[in-house]
Amino acid sequence: MSANVRALAAKCCYAVVDKGRSLADELPQLQEKVAGKDKGLLQELCYGVLRYLPELEHSCRQLVTKPLKGKQRVVHFLILVGIYQIKYTRIPDHAAVSESVAATKPLKHFHLKALVNGVLRGFQRMSADGQSEVADAIKFNHPSWFINKIKQAYPSDWQQVLTANMAKPPMWLRVNQLQNSVAHYQEQLKQAKIDIELVDSNSGAIKLVTPVDVGSLPGFNHGEVSIQDGAAQQAAVLLDCQSGDRVLDCCAAPGGKTCHMLELTPGIASMTAIDVDENRLARVKENLSRLNLSAKTIAGDASDPESWWDGELFDRILLDAPCSGTGVIRRHPDIKWLRQASDIDKLVILQQQILTKVWSLLKPGGTLLYATCSILPEENCEQIQQFINKEPNAELVSLNSNSDTIGWQILPNQQSMDGFYYAKLTKRI
Ligand SMILES: C[S@@+](CC[C@H](N)C(=O)[O-])C[C@H]1O[C@@H](n2cnc3c(N)ncnc32)[C@H](O)[C@@H]1O
């Protein structure tokens, strides 16, 4: 009777790898023990395991909690033979598993058959997941690392999030309410034959049916209107600046939210707009000038206030933090390919540093609004939860009816808006 091919392959690899024997010496004697048609299979299994050894060992390590030692090492090689068959041969998976499990008997380690079975089935599942990862990356056109994060964060909505990222973004307008009422500007749009799809009753933001050329918007050059997504327009509404306030916008460029705050509250006593990037800060100045607004603009690092702060505390602070931009992928599809998984941890640290520093510039009783255009919990609710845990004087203000959640997470295309996050904090007196 022909011997079990998997058992012989395991013995052969064990002899070569653990005992230092040469394959040319070992293999021919073992081949004599099997029938003609199995000689080729035995050769393929031995050569295959030795070719792919590090990779097979790596897979095995992920699945075997307690490494096999001493005489049981031959079973370790049997597992590698099994993994090799599943990954690199056309042998059906079920046959690869059952034949390898059966090989524990001639190897005189029948008591380890459950282990071999469990490990190979675990490997089968692992590789099936790997394949579905690749399939999802192609189906949803996003990198696998990102899909995994979104699946984790939104187990029931992840497909909608990824699909929303593929849509063409809508055009939202912000009416400069110092120059015009929202109702009157709607009338102007009508006269210009520009169709409106909806008006957000909360912020007054107008969403157009179809994006138009900026030049065709009535009064754009005179500062009557700006382009700004509906989600970004929630910032000034939520921070709710009051006349007489000293306001800091510490990551301000290109200035959309700085200008919106000034438009909504003309009595703001002073507005300081900081950005670390001088070129981007120039865009804040352009926007202020087009809209006929004024603010103190400073090129500076928000995590190092000592280098720019005049020593007077602020009543309101907007921290529109540097972030992964994962909420605005529909507007910037390059984010999918420019961002790496490793960037997220660095951004989380930077956000935390800026938040801690600017919090110290807030008056007791003052309000800070933390914002990101991210949909990743680590940059948003988890970031804020950690901050509250370590800052006893930080109090979270509820932003939506569901008071269980920390802050307000807007998902891409929710109410037609970009993906955004807001958390409002007040400083206890
Ligand atoms: C999300 S954008 C701000 C958008 C802006 N608030 C608006 O509504 O137009 C983040 C900004 O943070 C700036 N930034 C990044 N790191 C910074 C730092 N350490 N200090 C100040 N600004 C920083 C970036 O240059 C970028 O302009």
Image (cartoon, rainbow, N blue to C red):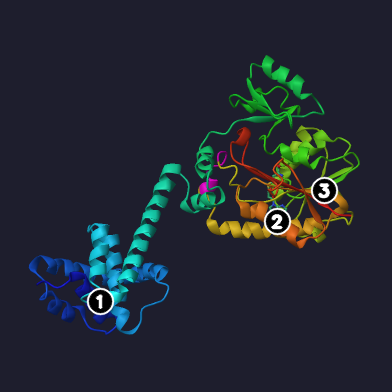
Residue at left offset 39%, top offset 59%:
126
Q: Is residue 404 magenta?
A: no
Camera-side residue of 253 and 366: 366
Please, what is the dominant secondary structure of the magenta stretch?
loop
Q: Which residue is mark 3?
A: 367
Give the SS element for disc 2.
helix
Which quadrant does the N terminus fall into? bottom left
Q: Quadrant of residue 11?
A: bottom left
Q: Is residue 142 above or below residue 389?
A: above
The answer to whether residue 38 is left or right of residue 17 is: left
Q: Is residue 303 visible?
A: no
Front-lying residue, 350 or 74: 74
Q: Helix or strand or loop: what does disc 3 sit on?
A: strand
Residue carrying label 2: 385
Structural distance between the alpha carbons of marks 3 and 1: 68 Å
First in residue order: circle 2 vs circle 3: 3
Inspect the image, locate mark 3, and give the three-letter code of the amino acid beneath it. Answer: Thr
Relative to the observer, which residue lies in front, 340 or 10? 10
In the image, which is nearer the foreground, mark 2 or mark 3? Answer: 2
Residue 120 vertical position relative to residue 359 in the rendered view, above or below:
below
Secondary structure beneath label 1: helix
Q: What residue lies at 26% left-to-right and 79% top-to-bottom? A: 14
Q: Which residue is mark 1?
A: 13
49 in relation to 181, above or below: below
| Cα–Cα gap, marks 2 and 3 | 17 Å
The region drawn magenta spans 330-336
User: Residue 288 location in percent, x, y?
Assistant: 78, 37
